[in-house]
Amino acid sequence: MTRSGLVKLVGLCAVILLAVAAYRLLATAVAPKIEHRIAEIGLSPNEIAANGPLPGDVSLYAKELACARNLQTPGYFPSINGAEIADAQRSGMFPCATFTGSFEGPNQVFAWRSAIDYDTASYINNRLPGELYISGGQAPPPKGAVPPGPFVAKADATTGREIWRTYLDNGNVSGAWIANTNLNILPNGRIVTAWQNKVALLDGDTGLILKMTTLPTGPTPAIDASFKHLTIAPDGTLILKDQTRPSGCKLQGTMAIIQCNEPGMKQGNSNLVAVNPDTLEVLDSAALPEPATVPHIITMFEGRIAIYIGVNSGALRYFWDPQTKKLSQDMSWAVKPMKEGQTTSDAPSILGDWIVLQTNGLGSETVASSIVAVNQKDASRMQVIFPFGELKKGEWSWAPPKPQTDPENSMIYSADMGVGKVAGIKIDQATGEMKTVWIVDDTTNAFQPLIGPKDKRVMLLSNARKNVEREPVKLALFTGNYKEQATWRDAATGRIIAESDFFEPLSIGALITPGFGGRVYFPTNKGFMVLQVMPAVRQP
């Protein structure tokens, strides 16, 4: 090689070495900027405003926990949200949760996504401040490979960072029908959850499965049963009831009930089971006379533990006797409020002496949904109201969530996703007569939890917006082709106080869950969003 060639080669090597050195020196500075920019792509304004995890107002934690411990929630861990929907009555009332915004507005919503994905998160429960438990992995596509689940996970309540995750099934292997599950926290801090024909007890600290029991499904084969409905009686006994998929249906997910009901496939009857909370021993079971697609509630009635069950034809009452360890039907109390063309009652709600039902839990194309109030002492005393009027030609009524009740304010709330409206209804607790006092345009199939004190009750309500405006709501629902937001409303008037950006949809059947420090959790198929409202900073 010539001298000039050698000089050129040395020079080229020097340039390369300098470039490598520069890259290495600048990488530590450039990479975070690139990563930060990538992280910003696709963020909503609510997330950009937060710019990180939301701890909420930490000064409220101790006050909220002390308040929760003074509530009467026998059978459940005393926390702001230790049960699927507040308590054994599934009341949806969270008086110890705080609204940290301005009741008069304007307000700013902040949001941040959980640090990792939790496939189809549905229910999110708190034990102590900082502890978050997530039920997920139970909304597979109707056909094809089934994502593993259901699972229960424990996460950091601020970041969503996973602490542990316990998988309970894999439908690809077991062949089980995988549908929605719930979870509840027992007074000793353990987690109890059920799916298909099984119930499991988990260590709340480690996620270790301590016990598992197979449940009797009565007249329906186990392949078509799903014990999603688990509620705890005042004496601590677990009372479980299964949803049933129509016989011959091969679809996965809870929506299989609707999709296979529509062509006329027949559901099997449900089974009611009492289980020891410590040993998971099956104490008794009772075959119901018909399918019960929706959850039951438990309360005390004239000194007895009463179980109210919404069934396809209306509602039934059963009693649980802790002394004899027996379940029995109260044949004197049965309700059949359905008009021809209406479908199953939703889960019952309690309001004083009244049991409140919502119809069209499986949808109707001919008759509007109604709210039904039935007296606990006398089932013949029944009042009915159609809060949204008659169903118009071409409309579809679908009202899956239980009616939310507020006994202190004598209010009932009704949501019908099919017609895209939510109503506030006033009830006379002496007579049961009802009057619609407000209606808002709001498309939701979610629950409507209430937070805060009686005089400033705030309703947490989702609101869906179709991606294709003219697409029928049923098609958008079945394909998930819509976005959804959280709204905070004045429960007395329906007025919006604050509203979030639109995110991916809530998981079907999920609850916008209140947490400590003014936060709420918005569970989706990708995990969950943490949201908080604060008074907007006024610009000078």
Image (tube, grey):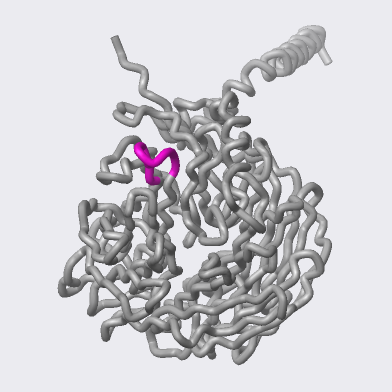
Q: Residue at x 40, y 89 (%)?
A: 264
The residue most toward the front is 302
Task: Identify whether 253 is placed above or below 466.
Answer: below
Q: Can you see residue 149?
A: no
Asked whether residue 286 is drawn in magenta, I would say no
**Which quadrant is the N terminus positioned in?**
top right
**Nearest the eye: 314 or 49:** 314
Task: Identify whether 66 is placed above or below 277.
Answer: above
Q: Looking at the picture, how far across and down is residue 442, in whole percent?
A: 28, 53
Asked whether residue 453 is drawn in magenta, I would say yes
Res 486 → quadrant: top left
Q: Can you see residue 68?
A: yes
| Figure label count | 0
**Nearest the eye: 301 or 454:** 301
Q: Looking at the picture, how far across and down is residue 237, in whole percent?
A: 69, 68
Residue 215 lies left or right of residue 462; in this view the side is right
Q: Looking at the picture, how far across and down is residue 376, in whole percent?
A: 42, 72
**Which quadrant is the C terminus positioned in?**
top left
Q: Residue at x 47, y 80 (%)?
A: 316
Q: Residue at x 72, y 73 (%)?
A: 275
Q: Residue at x 27, y 82 (%)?
A: 339
Magenta residues, start to end: 451-459
**Nearest the eye: 72 or 370:** 72
Residue 340 lies left or right of residue 247; in this view the side is left
Q: Looking at the picture, how far across and down is residue 491, in whole percent?
A: 32, 45
